[in-house]
Image (spheres, rainbow, N blue to C red):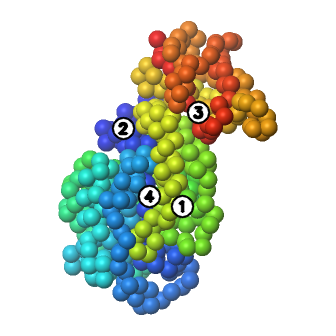
Amino acid sequence: MSTPVPEKRVAEFEKFGFGMFIHWGLYSQLGRGEWVQHHEKIPSGEYEKLASTFTASEFDAHKIAETAKKAGAKYITLTTRHHEGFSLYDTRGLCSFDSPHTPAGRDLIREFVDACNDTGIAPFFYHTTLDWHHPDFNADFKSYLKYLRASVEILCTQYGKIGGFWFDGNWSRPEDDWEEDELYSLIRKYQPDAIIVNNTGIEKRGLCGNTELDSVTFEQGRPTPMNREGMQKYMAAEMCQTMNNHWGYGSHDFAYKSAYALIETLCACRKVGANYLLNVGPTGEGRIPLLQEALLYNIGEWIKAVGTTAIYEGKPCGIAGETDKKDFALRSGNKIWFFIHDMNYTGNKNRSPEGGGNGVRAFTGIADGTVLENLHWTDSNEPVNASFRDGRFFIDCPGYPYGTSLVVRIAEANIK
């Protein structure tokens, strides 16, 4: 069976590698996550009152875009409308449950797109497909779908070129006809180069849906390698993840992942060719919490330290770590990068409790006769000792010098 070739937009999307997800809406004012209305059974009339206190007073789209850029993210996916049914854009008469009809009085998606364009970040639109606010969602589903498509048409036509659309909610009514073909053909009409994603949810990670989709999703779970043999079209993969346990702002959610874990996850995604979409949940006023901002900056500093080319350009090439199963290699043209995890420190054991280095790492999957030149660490440009033996490639990992700990270190070589 043959493997399809990715369309240009999909190939470009895979090279983005890393993106920022933003969940922000009325729920952010309550600070108890994006599902607070549903979980706490807040009546619709009471919940709607949150619109009267929505000011967006600290929402600075340009600062957010700059934060994404410093983090090394190439795109931002923002919730234009989440399940609560409130829109951050001007719905132009479709409803009044939107940001221009609040004290904010602004089309926040307009600001977002302008800031992304100014910063060189691709703007992506998250849009819910389920809706707790619109009465037709339960009363007249076909009529609701027309409302949904009219909403998406506004996003397609009023904001210039959009990087992609990220839908979420079809899993809420698995037996119903969501008229996906009509929705996707609408997007292709106005935004032919946009990536289209429709989240399959936690229970169906990696599932390929409608053939017009461009990427599968792995919500909150490590992505697995894609077997594209015999596929009708080439589909990318993307894993989305929270920094703590909520997508929307959780004022008392302190269960944050470490920078170590986030960097490792980014590498695990790239290992199988998937993008990593990492979420932040701004406060009710629209400010990214300091810890989330700091974690993003930390990832950006790591990407700069190890070299950006490997993260964005490298693709899976069948080379795997044998000594440490987390280790792997990526390739682009005649360049190859070895991602090496959990190296220890060199130096006196009283200063470096794990002193002594890591010895040799073995890799399999490199063809016999392959000649690698100029093998060096990307962070220091120092040469790396290596050798071929018994069909395996061995890299000498003496350990980090004191004062350095990269979580994952990258060695680069040229294939002669």
Q: Is residue 235 left or right of residue 245?
A: left
Q: Which residue is mark 3?
A: 409
User: Of residues 350 and 187, which is closer to you in this image?
Assistant: 350
Vertical arrangement, residue 405 with respect to residue 19, above or below: above
Q: Residues within 10 Å of mark 1 (few under 14, many from 20)?
A: few
**Mark 3 and mark 1: Cα distance apart in space:** 24 Å
Q: Nearer the viewer, mark 2 or mark 3?
A: 3
Amino acid at dot 2: Ala
SS under mark 4:
strand
Q: Disc 2, disc 1: CB below 8 Å?
A: no
- Circle on res. 291: 1
Vertical arrangement, residue 86 with respect to residue 164, above or below: below
Q: Nearer the viewer, mark 1 or mark 4?
A: 1
**Mark 4 and mark 2: Cα distance apart in space:** 20 Å
SS under mark 2:
helix
N-term mark: 1 or 4: 4
Q: Which residue is mark 4?
A: 21
Q: Is residue 304 left or right of residue 96?
A: right
The residue at the point 32 percent across, 59 percent down is 62
